[in-house]
Structures are given as structure tokens and as C-alpha cells.
Image (cartoon, rainbow, N blue to C red):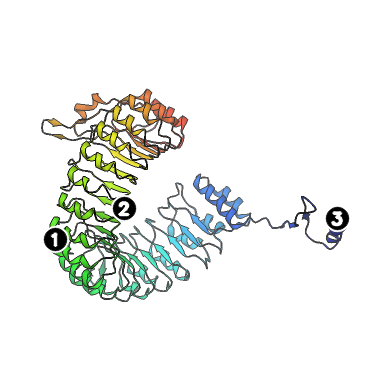
Amino acid sequence: MGLACSKKQRREEEEDGGAPIVRLSPFRPRRLLSRSRSLPPTLSQCLWEGLVGCGQLDDAAVLKLSGLGLHFFRLPLGAYPERVQPSWLRCLSTPSLEAADLSKTEASGMDEVLASLGPTPHLAQLCLDYCVDLTDGGLALLQGMTSLEELSLAGCELLTAVGMGHLRGLTRLRRLSLQTCHQISLAPLAQLRQLEQLDVGWCSSLDDSDAQVTDHGLACLHSLGQLRALNLAGVRVSDEALAALLRHLPHLRALNLERCLQAGDASLAAVSQRALQLRELHLGYTAVSDRGLLLLGGLTQLHVLSLENCSVGDGGLAVLSHLTQMRQLDLSDTSASNETMSTVAAMRQLECLNLSFTGVNDLGLKRLRRLSSLRCLNLDSRHFTDAGMVSVAQLAGLECLDLFGARIGDAGCASLSKLKNLRRLEVCGGGVTDAGVAHLVALTRLQHLSLAQASACWGSCTLPNYRVSNSCILHLIKLNELMALNLSQACACTTQNLHRCRVTSNSVVALGCLPKLQTLALYETRVKPFAVDKLLAANPDLCVQGVAPTGSA
């Protein structure tokens, strides 16, 4: 009875001109088939990104796509390997577009490419980083994109103050990057009162009213009261100009002053008075001293602090006892010693720590054994040896460990084999042999491994080098998660030591069985082009560095 009723209803619908009905069962709900050829936006996006990822875009492919009535919400063309044609964007740009990445794109005139985007009423994110031929005329085309919230123009060195003037009407803009745009002016940015993040790092030639970016330049930013992150890295900024600016930025959470060579203790005094809410502070390569550093004790919410290459030592670093919320701490190239490690050990939420080229040694590492939250640790220093790795092995949460210049041998590798969560490891001091590599096989989650036996010659003494041989390959092929492997064997005295290179062609070919390997570095090894040919035959997507395949230029 049910089937009969169902057939009768179908005939009535067909007589009324209704759309055809697909029924797999009389008991399943009816589904109408659309006569439109367009795909849902999510499927359209997957199709588009698949073609981009494979580098398969050309005029014919774009023409076919444009005839399907597709709707995209992202254009991920950043660093696309082929020249991007404006005609492609004319065909594929849709009103539904929300984000476009054209960074590092090779195009026949970026201004024309932007003009090809057409009306984009919902475009909120636009990345044009290192589009080196972008001009002020191209920025003029952005004036109608009033929905823009994020705009990145890093490396667009042809832009000037005129181009900045075209940004005045983008009143919804919240994030703006102008890094290394050397000819711009800050004055037009004063109208962008909704800005929350501003990057003018490395704009070393920044010029405002015939003055370098000090009082005149930074004064233009006083109206940006909503700023939460400000990057002034590499910019010539005085203590006075910075102090005046901080009075107007009550919501600032992140401040980057790296390589602001004129910034010193007076800048830290201003920070301690006007920016107690800071979560992130970068002071690498500035003129701060122990005296200025001690002023930061009130920044109790600080999560990130970088002091790379600052003239500070244990005296100034005593301030760290007040900064107990720290997540990332960079003390590289400072005079920090084992004494400071007692203070660092109290930072139980610390996730990243850089102790490269400091006075800390194996004894200092013993004090860090209870930092259970530590994920990344940099110990690039000759002060660290196998003895210190016993302490490091107790940091069970470590995922990234840099021992580039440390004096680590097979015993140290045996200790490191306990770090089961390790994803990235560099052991390049020249002391590891095939037996040490055998210990590393226990690190089954390892994705990036560098065993580059790089060393330097000091007078008549050459550091141990070239101890890894073909035998290590038998162990390495067991690390199925490896994505990047460095077996380079370089030394400052290459001409004297090249005969000692022990990784050769026949053994390296076996690495082709690693299912996820993407990068293999083989500088200064005995590997020949025919071995690279075999590796590429097994893994066509593999990037081999240091040895070219047969027939390459």
C-alpha cells in the first residue's frame, strides 16, 4: 500500500513540473537534486587548494574552474612556484572571498593582480608580503576594501608615504605589518584608531617630517590607544620617544625593541612605569644593563622575555624571582651563570629556555630537573657535556633540544634516549659515533634530526669529527616519523678532513624507505649523484641538499 501511494505522489509531482526526486527507499526522506552545477563552498575550496598545492594551475585549469560556478573563501597563492596571471584572479575572485595570500608571488605586475580581485565586500585578510613590485598605485586599490581587518605588506620596499595615505579609510584594520618598508611614513597611520597590532620593525630609513623615527615618528602613533602589540625591532628609537609613546598605549601587551641600539635603562624605566600589563618583551641587542633590568620586577604578568646579547649577569637577572609567570626566557649570549639557574628553577610554567653561549654548565642543569613544563631547550655551548645530559633526561616533556655545539658523545645519547616526546634534536659537536645513533632509535617521535659533524679547528687542535659512518643508516631507517635529516660532515679544515667522510652512496640509498622524509642534507659527504637519483626515484618529493642528481646544472 505504501509503495502504491509513493508512486502516485511521484506522478503528481512530475506533472506539476517539480524537480526530479531521488529515492533509495520509500522509507528515506526525499532529497531534491539541484539543477545548479555549483559545488558547496567547502568542496570548492578543497578543489582549489588541491590544485594550488600540486602546482597545477594554468590558463586551461582556471577556465574550467570558472565555468563551474565555484565559490571560494580563501585564495592561498603565497609563494606559488609559477607566475600568477591577473586573468586567473578575474575568473576566480568571488564576492564570498574572505582571505587572500599573495605573498612572495611572482606576477606580471602586482598592481594589476590586485585590480583583478574585483569587488570583495567580505575580504578581511590580505597578505602581500615581499611582493617587491607593489607600488603606491596598487595600495590605492585597497581603499574600497573597507572590510579589511588584517593587512601584511612586509618587504614591499617601493611603498612610500603616499601609499600609506591610501590606508586611512581602512577603519576596521586591526593588524598591520610594514616590516622593512623603508620609505614609508607613520603619519597617515594616526587615523587607524582600531589598530591592535602594528609591525614597523627594520624600517631603518623611516622618515617623518625630515626626522628619523624618534620623537616625530613615534608621536604619530599616540592616537593608537587600542594597540596591544608593537614591533619596533631595528628602528632608531630614543628612550625619550619611547617613554612618551607608552603613556598613550594603556592596552599594550607585547613590545619588541630588539636591536634598538639607542634603547637602554631609561626605556626600561618607562616600561616599568607605564606598561606593567606587558606579557611579552624583547630586548635583544639593546643597551640595557643590570641596573635597568632590576626595574622590571613589577611586570608580574610577563610571559616572554628575551635578553639575547645584553650586558646583563646574575645581579640583574635576580629580577627573575619576581617574574614567576614566565613561559619563554632567552638568556643567550649573556653573563648568566649557574647562580641564576636557581631562580629559573622556580619558574614552574616555563616552556622554552635558551642558555646558549652563557656561563651555565652541567652543574647548573641539575637545578632545572623539576621544570616539568619545559618543551624547548637550547644548550648550544661547549660548557655542556654528557654529564649534563643525565639531568636533561629528567625533563620528560621536552620536544625540542638544541645541542649544536655541546660536547656530546655516545654516553650523552644514551641519556637522551629517555626523552620519548622529543621531536627535534641537534647533536653536532662531533663526538657522536654509530653507537650513539643506535641509542637515538628509541626516540620514535623524532621528526627533525641533525647529526651534522660540524667542527672548527683551534690552532693545532681539531675537535672530534666524522665519527658517523654508513653503519648509522641501519639505525636511522627505523625512525619512521623523520621529516628532516642532516648528515653533513663539514669542517673549517675541509681540505684536510674530507678523506675522513664516512657516509657514502650505497648506504644513503636506504633512506628512501623513510615514509615521511622531506629534507636530507648531505654536504661534504662521499655521496654521488647516482645515489640521489635512486633516492628521488623512491621519494620524488624529497629535497636533497649538498649533492645534485645526475644531469643537473
User: Distance of mark 3 from mark 2, alpha carbons?
Assistant: 66 Å
Q: Residues within 10 Å of mark 3 (few under 14, many from 20)?
A: few
Q: From what the image shows, is residue 460 above or below residue 165?
A: above
Residue at which label 3 appears: 2
Mark 1 belongs to which amino acid?
Asp
Q: Secondary structure at mark 1?
A: helix
Residue at which label 1 appears: 290
Q: Earlier in the sequence, mark 1 or mark 2?
A: 1
Q: Position of residue 461 (x, y in %)?
A: 13, 31
* Residue 158 relative to residue 47: left or right: left
Q: Position of residue 103 (x, y in %)?
A: 41, 55
Mark 2 belongs to which amino acid?
Glu
- Residue 512 visible somewhere in the drawing: yes
Mark 3 belongs to which amino acid?
Gly
Q: Secondary structure at mark 2?
A: loop
Numbered tag placed on residue 351 in the rendering: 2
